[in-house]
């Protein structure tokens, strides 16, 4: 269980992360949201988006790389 301060920090970080995810192109943002925020499996995302699992994996990988660049540029990890 988290203290009220830790909970507030986690909520703030979560909001910031969502903001950065929305800066991605949809082809990267949607798989990331489905996988990490909604808990979909790769197979479920593949079915939902009508894409091969390999394409979903590639988009997750590329999306994570782009997200890291956006976060570093935005200063979230520079504190």
Image (cartoon, grey):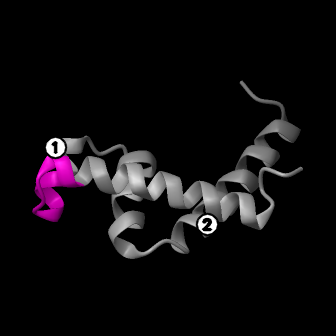
Q: Which mark is residue 23?
A: none
Q: Is the residue 70 above or below the residue 6 in the image?
A: below
Q: Tell me residue 60's x, y (percent).
A: 37, 51
Q: Is residue 54 magenta?
A: yes
Give the residue drawn at x 75%, y 66%: 74
Q: Tell me residue 4's x, y (percent).
A: 84, 38
Question: Which residue does the numbered mark 2 point to in the structure image?
Answer: 20
The residue stretch that appears in magenta:
46-55
Question: Which residue does the numbered mark 1 point to in the structure image?
Answer: 43
Q: Is the residue 6 above or below the residue 24 in the image?
A: above
Q: Mark 1 packing: few (<14 Cα in 10 Å), some, or many (20+)?
A: some
Give the residue drawn at x 74%, y 65%: 73
Give the residue drawn at x 49%, y 52%: 64
SS for dot 1: helix
For the N terminus, which image quadrant?
top right
Pointer 2 or 1: first along the chain: 2
> Disc 2 to disc 1, how far (Cα)?
25 Å
- Is 70 displayed left or right of 77 in the figure? left
Q: Is residue 19 magenta?
A: no
- Is 2 displayed left or right of 66 in the figure? right
Give the residue drawn at x 68%, y 59%: 71
Q: Is residue 38 visible?
A: no
Q: Quadrant of residue 55?
A: bottom left
SS for dot 2: helix
> What secondary structure is the magenta-colored segment mainly?
helix
Counting every numbered tag in the picture gives 2
Q: 23 or 4: nearer the eye? A: 23
Q: 18 or 1: nearer the eye? A: 18
Q: Is residue 53 visible?
A: yes
Q: Is the residue 77 above or below the residue 2 in the image?
A: below
């Amino acid at each position: 269980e988290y203290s009220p301060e830790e909970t507030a920090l986690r909520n703030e970080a979560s909001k910031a992360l969502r903001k950065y995810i929305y800066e991605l192109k949809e082809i990267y943002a949607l798989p990331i949201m489905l996988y990490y925020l909604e808990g979909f499996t790769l197979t479920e995302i593949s079915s939902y988006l009508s894409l091969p699992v390999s394409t979903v994996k590639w988009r997750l990988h590329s999306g994570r790389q782009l997200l890291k660049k956006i976060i570093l540029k935005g200063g979230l990890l520079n504190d």
